[in-house]
Image (tube, coloured by chain):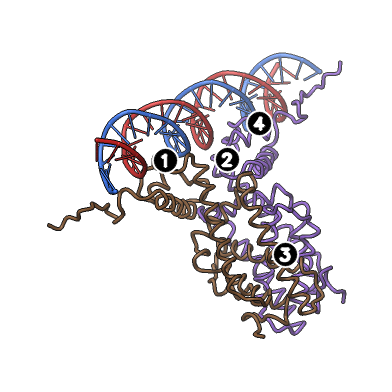
Chain colours: A brown, B purple, C red, D blue
Amino acid sequence: MDETVKPKRPDGQPRKASRDTRRQQLINSTIATIGRCGYAKTTLTEVARNAGLSHGLINFHFQTKEQLLSDTLLFLMNEYRDNWIRALHEAGPRPADQLAALLRADFNEVICTEEKRTAWVAFWGEAQSRPVYQAMCGPMDQEYALRLEEICANLVSEGGYAMKSEDAARVLRAMLEGIWLELVRSVSRYSLAVAERTAFTAAAALFPKHFTAGGPIPA
Amino acid sequence: MDETVKPKRPDGQPRKASRDTRRQQLINSTIATIGRCGYAKTTLTEVARNAGLSHGLINFHFQTKEQLLSDTLLFLMNEYRDNWIRALHEAGPRPADQLAALLRADFNEVICTEEKRTAWVAFWGEAQSRPVYQAMCGPMDQEYALRLEEICANLVSEGGYAMKSEDAARVLRAMLEGIWLELVRSVSRYSLAVAERTAFTAAAALFPKHFTAGGPIPA
DNA sequence: CAAGATTGATTATATGGCCAATCAAAATGA
DNA sequence: TCATTTTGATTGGCCATATAATCAATCTTG
């Protein structure tokens, strides 16, 4: 007979999954739901429906809705951090290559999907009224800001540029977040390629000896 | 006797105010409430309490909560638009002065308060899931983008810069929105003066013949 | 069979919308 | 000038609904 020994659900998933698998599945569904319905209209029932599970299960794996949401944000933050840390690690010692790696990493197809960008902006919108989010984001943001300032300082001393390196770093940081925002908000949503080109245009303007709008100038 | 003929409320306001006065008062309270509690936790009761009025009154002046929120966004948008239009009008014909006016206008103390910035980010977070907001923001954003691109194109042809003017405009636009976001999110919230300096750093990098980090170079 | 995951009915709570009663100010009339 | 009426803003209690949380029963798998 053609019945499988281990009965599967319609979607092919085993009914009983490991703790971590389910948690991740629910987090992914939360991201998708926030992306589709917005933060305010994200309900447990909707998250559960998108995951094809019952809403009671959410309270089993996460104690409260708050937990689910902050664990989702935590996942996004770790994913984002891992991404730029890895990119930087692979970039080698030249500051121009390092900045290029940071800029490209921001538009990596895995972390910069439509859904995730939308979820990020939704979290930003709620962050200032939730100390929990602030506490989580603060250190992560600062780590990134510090590393970026370091790289900018190296570029400034290398190229003998006149500007203050902190100002340059602030321009780049703000622009990167701004592009994410535009990718979400803009009617004429531009592609990731255009986004990257925009970032390098800024880098070229700030550090003309190291960059063109097409990318870093080879050694 | 010292009783006033027209009895006033404890806060000095007449019990009965004109339609427009009340509407504006409720919109202001909505901005404040979104700023303090976030979009998701903004309830009619809370908005009414912050305004010192009963919640029933909101449904009288605005039919639904949706109405109240979209009218609030409309107010913010018109205020923002009026601000940069006026600034541009007062700037004269030189493109460098025009860009300087736009950059400064973005950090005007009236439109760029803590509360309003926070409310803006909250609306951005919800916008993609609400066609109503999209429809309202789209044309306004496009008008601004168009004007900015025009000015950048003039600067590029004036200075003979090598870059594409649309790329420069995109950098500036993204950076301005990014700075607003950072002013809301950042732990080390910087002052509006620093924000303005950052914006001019970008302008100086893009258009070095026209700007320094301190502002536009006089004719 | 035991342990743990999963379900879905149930409960408690919060919130938006509704509305009848109230009240203040303006309009009207004597 | 003062009393009366009218108008429309304002209040607060009420209700229907939505939603998060709970939990006992059920199902899966080892």
B1 above or below A45?
above
Q: Do tag 1 and tag 4 residues touch (Cβ < 8 Å)?
A: no
Q: Do tag 2 and tag 3 residues touch (Cβ < 8 Å)?
A: no
Callout in the foreground (4, 2): 2
- Answer left or right for B2 relative to B119: right
SS at mark 1 in the image: helix
- Residue nearest the viewer, comparing C4 with A141: C4
Q: Could you tell me if residue B166 is visible in this image?
A: no
Quote the CA–CA distance across marks 1 and 2: 25 Å
| Residue of label 3 | A170
D3 above or below A103?
above
Return the chain for callout 3. A
Q: Earlier in the sequence, mark 3 or mark 1?
A: 1
| Residue of label 4 | B53
Q: Amino acid at mark 2?
A: Lys
Mark 1 packing: few (<14 Cα in 10 Å), some, or many (20+)? few
- Answer left or right for A18 relative to A213: left
- Marks 2 and 3 on same chain: no
Quote the CA–CA distance across marks 3 and 1: 43 Å
Quote the CA–CA distance across marks 4 and 2: 18 Å
Quote the CA–CA distance across marks 1 and 4: 41 Å
Callout in the foreground (1, 4): 1
Callout in the foreground (3, 1): 1
Q: Amino acid at mark 3?
A: Arg
| Residue of label 2 | B41
Q: Position of residue A92 (x, y in %)?
A: 62, 76
The numbered mark at residue A60 is 1
Mark 3 packing: few (<14 Cα in 10 Å), some, or many (20+)? many
Callout in the foreground (1, 2): 1
Q: Position of residue B80 (x, y in %)?
A: 70, 56
Q: Earlier in the sequence, mark 4 or mark 2?
A: 2
SS at mark 2 in the image: loop
